[in-house]
Image (tube, rainbow, N blue to C red):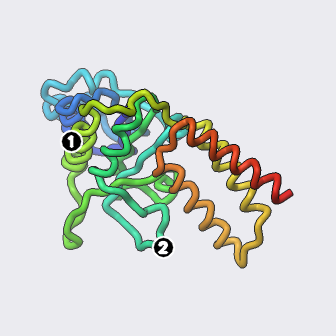
Amino acid sequence: MIEIILMEPEISGNIGAIARVMKNFGFKDLVLINPKCDHLSQEARNRAKHANDLLRNAKIEKKGYLKSYDYLIGTTASLGTDYNIPRSPISPEQLGEKLSAIKKSKIGLLFGREGQGLTNKEIQKCDFIVTIPTPKEYPTLNISHSLSIILYEIFKKLNKKTTISHISPASKKEKEIILKKIDNILNKLEFATKEKKETQRKIWKRIIGKSFLTKREAFALIGFLRKLEWTKQ
């Protein structure tokens, strides 16, 4: 299941346009985090056209709801350098390829505020981020346009038959176990500075998030990390 999440949306017309795009590509689950406007206003309903049912069924949630996903994927046009690990992105096409192998996970696709996007703290909570390649001179797209491009790439991949659809992906719980064990191992290692240790934590969180491990792979990795834990005792 893929839910489209809007962080503190401010313009009701944008919510309507997003609902319309979602319906165009067969997505129906819309989540609004602390909305700053009325998603059922006349403007929103006019923009939604035949997707008013998505507006009526939209879930209104607090930020804590973001913890409920097996995979939380952020979107941004503001990228950093190679050293800015949290803002190291993949493309919409790459995202579609990854999601084509995931059938049983709860996935959240998170979009930021119209004016300022997602904060660094919110980006940190994501497993990884996706960005649309655009010219540096004017990289930011309208939120509904961005959603159109991303959902198009996902739609293309999800509607292809695959020979690996029977393979179960790793769950949020299994990812948390892996990251906890990595954290335990890092705490037993010596680093020149606290910052270097924190960089390792960030890198491993991104690696695990982007890899979309299967359950079998996750169990094997947990077993391997457990052996490393014992070695370091």
Of all residues shown, which one is farthest toward the right?
Answer: 233
Amino acid type, label 2: Tyr
Tag 2: Cα neighbours inside 10 Å, few (<14), some, or many (≥20)? few
The spot of residue 229 in percent (x, y) is: 78, 53
Q: Nearer the viewer, residue 169 or 148?
A: 169
Q: To which residue does mark 1 refer?
A: 152
* Residue furthest out toward the front: 163
* Front residue of 22 and 60: 22
Q: Nearer the viewer, residue 145 or 207?
A: 207
Residue 53 position within the rendered picture, expressed as x and y whole percent measured from the top left = 24, 21
Which residue is drawn at the image coordinates 46% and 51% (left, top)?
210
**Residue at the spot x=43%, y=36% of the render?**
107
Taking the spot 43% from the left edge, 62% from the top edge, the residue there is 87
Vertical comparison of 116 with 49: above or below: below
Identified at 72% across, 61% down, the residue is 186
Q: Residues within 10 Å of mark 1 (few under 14, many from 20)?
A: some
Which quadrant holds residue 79? bottom left
Quarter of the image that includes the N terminus = top left
Asked where in the image residue 98 lies, by quadrant, the reply is top left
Do we see residue 42 in this rendering? no
- Sequence order check: which comes first, mark 1 or mark 2? 2
For label 2, the residue is: 83
The kind of secondary structure element at disc 2 is: loop
Q: How far is the residue under mark 1 from the one under mark 2?
A: 30 Å
Residue 138, percent across and down? 20, 68
**Percent from the top left, x then y, of residue 128?**
45, 53
* C-beta proximity under 8 Å, tags 1 and 2: no
Figure quadrant of the C terminus? bottom right
Does residue 170 appear anywhere in the picture?
yes
Hey, what amino acid is under mark 1? Tyr
Q: The residue tagged with tag 1: helix, strand or loop? A: helix
